[in-house]
Image: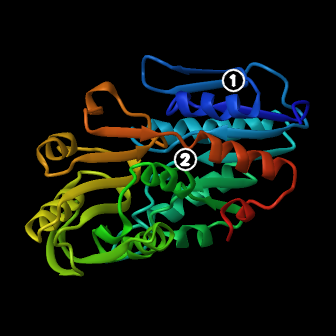
Amino acid sequence: MKETLKIFSGRSNPILAKGIVDHLGFDLGDVTIRTFSDGELWVKFEENIRGNDVFIIQSTSGPAENLIELFLLLDAAVRASAKRVTAVIPYFGYGRQDRKDQPRVPISSRVMVDIISTTGADRIISMDLHSTQIQGFASIPFDHIYSRMVLLDTLKSLDLNPDKCTVLAPDVGSAAMGQSYAKRLGFHFALIDKRRYAPNKAEVSHLIGDLKGKDVMIIDDMIDTAGTTVSAAKAAIDEGANSVVAVATHGVLSGSAIERLNSAPIDKIILTDTIALSEDKKISKMHVVSVADVFAEAIKRIHEGESVSALFNL
């Protein structure tokens, strides 16, 4: 496998990339990425990849140059005669802009998929997409993998009593994900019907379910400004919850997210490492678990022509 499989990383999340290759017993491939004084990027593969199965790891979280970096790496790999090029995108940016919800706006996630495909990717791998319909935008294979393998183990390690625990979906969009966790953990399930009055701003309208005396798990695909998560936590406490744990795959943590989370009635925040967190975004009640093993296994299965969905018992 080592003779034909090559794994490279952009600069968005080198720690996760290192974890992936460590699990496979590999070294990261040698690539040079530079930013010129005018802000333009330049990339070069420093080893021969002709005829190889190339995987390029790059989350497309902000800043936008992470996207440009990915596009350039894909193009360079194609021009270097790689046999197959796979874009491994742990966090798929622009995933929330998946529909034309008002006049004169783009479907940005479709634009991203189109550029990735046109630039030369033969396949895309991503984790816990905000909207699964994004897979349908692609004319190339698009593997959607899940963080629940590692997050379920983390939640089980908390040794909570299932009879006194409730998974709370903070909005209708996260209901399916929340129900999946509740079923696998044997927890109760509750739902918040949220009304959004502006981008990144929402308010609680109705809570469906009983939270009194319960340990509550708020589960979502991401925490961005933390407005949704904090509103759900406050609602849970107001309804008589004993404790609140917030769980999300992607820690975007933009704007005032850290200030909100610090002051919120949340006992623990569990995130994965799909997005690299700067030191100023790491707080004492935050616990980050790695999904490197999940990506490593998916890469191995794709390279060897095996089923990826079998990894998740789908």
Task: Name the amino acid, label 2.
Answer: Pro
- Residue at the location (42% across, 71% down)? 182
Considering the numbered disc 2 on the image, is that residue within a helix, a strand or a loop? Answer: loop
Sequence-earlier tag: 2 or 1 = 1
Is residue 156 shown left or right of residue 260?
right
Answer yes or no: is residue 120 visible.
no
Residue 24 x, y percent position in the rendering: 75, 34
The relative height of residue 189 versus residue 33 in the rendered view (above or below) is below
The relative height of residue 230 versus residue 8 in the rendered view (above or below) is below
- Residue at the location (11% across, 44% down)? 263
Q: CA distance from mark 2 to mark 1?
A: 22 Å
> Which residue is denoted by mark 2 in the rendering?
90
Pick whichever, 162 or 202, lies toward us.
Answer: 162
Can you tell which of label 2 and label 1 is closer to the viewer?
2
Considering the numbered disc 1 on the image, is that residue within a helix, a strand or a loop? Answer: strand
Q: Residues within 10 Å of mark 2 (few under 14, many from 20)?
A: many
Query: Dividing the image into 4 quarters, which one contains the C terminus?
Result: bottom right
Pick whichever, 37 or 307, lies toward us.
Answer: 307
What is the quadrant of residue 43 in the picture? top right
Colouring rule applied to residues: rainbow
Residue 95 x, y percent position in the rendering: 45, 60
Is residue 200 shown left or right of residue 124?
left
> Which residue is denoted by mark 1 in the rendering?
44
